[in-house]
Image (spheres, rainbow, N blue to C red):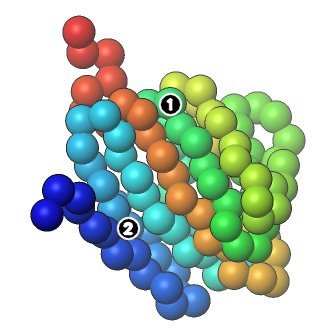
Amino acid sequence: MIEKTYTYAVADTKHIEKLIDDDPVMINHMILPQGDFVPDHHTNSYVHMIVVRGNLTLQLDEQEPHTYAKGTIVNIPYGTFMQVRNEHEDICEFFVVKSPSPRLYGKQ
């Protein structure tokens, strides 16, 4: 087989899972029920968050929190402080694409 396949969680419980960690890209999948969050952190690569279900609340650096609905892709620059949470009743599900993989970021 030439291709690789990957599976990801489909339940409605909290999941934070690394799906792919190759040199060119890291892809994480997250499911956050209402009130759940990701620990606060700084981005360690260029990040694209793809919201596929519900609403995602992001607070980046010093700006006010913003909410992004399903069907939205959010691009976040390297080194940005972020708070990621679900403040809404519906389950929030999203993918996080980091390119390049954080372990290679900044290497020449």
Q: Residue at x 42, y 34 (%)?
A: 99
Q: Is residue 62 above or below residue 96?
A: above
Q: Position of residue 68 (x, y in %)?
A: 80, 55
Q: Residue furthest top?
A: 108
Identify the residue position indicated by label 2 in the image: 17
Q: Alpha carbon of mark 1 to alpha carbon of mark 2: how far?
A: 18 Å
In the picture, measured across the screen, residue 13 lies left or right of residue 99, that is right
In the picture, measured across the screen, residue 42 lies left or right of residue 62, that is left
Residue 69 seen anywhere in this rendered image of the structure: yes
Q: State the quadrant of the C terminus.
A: top left
Q: Amino acid at mark 1?
A: Tyr
Residue 44 seen anywhere in this rendered image of the structure: no
Q: Position of residue 75 (x, y in %)?
A: 65, 36
Which comes sooner in the sequence, label 1 or label 2?
2
Identify the residue position indicated by label 1 in the image: 46
Q: State the quadrant of the N terminus.
A: bottom left
Kind of element beneath mark 2: strand
Q: Amino acid at mark 2?
A: Glu
Q: Residue at x 70, y 47 (%)?
A: 73
Asked which quadrant contains residue 91, the reply is bottom right
Q: Residue at x 51, y 90 (%)?
A: 11
Local crowd size for mark 2, using a 10 Å CA cut-off: few (<14), some (14–19), many (≥20): some
Q: Is residue 16 above or below residue 91?
A: above
Q: Residue at x 51, y 68 (%)?
A: 30
Kind of element beneath mark 1: strand
Q: Is residue 10 above or below residue 1?
A: below
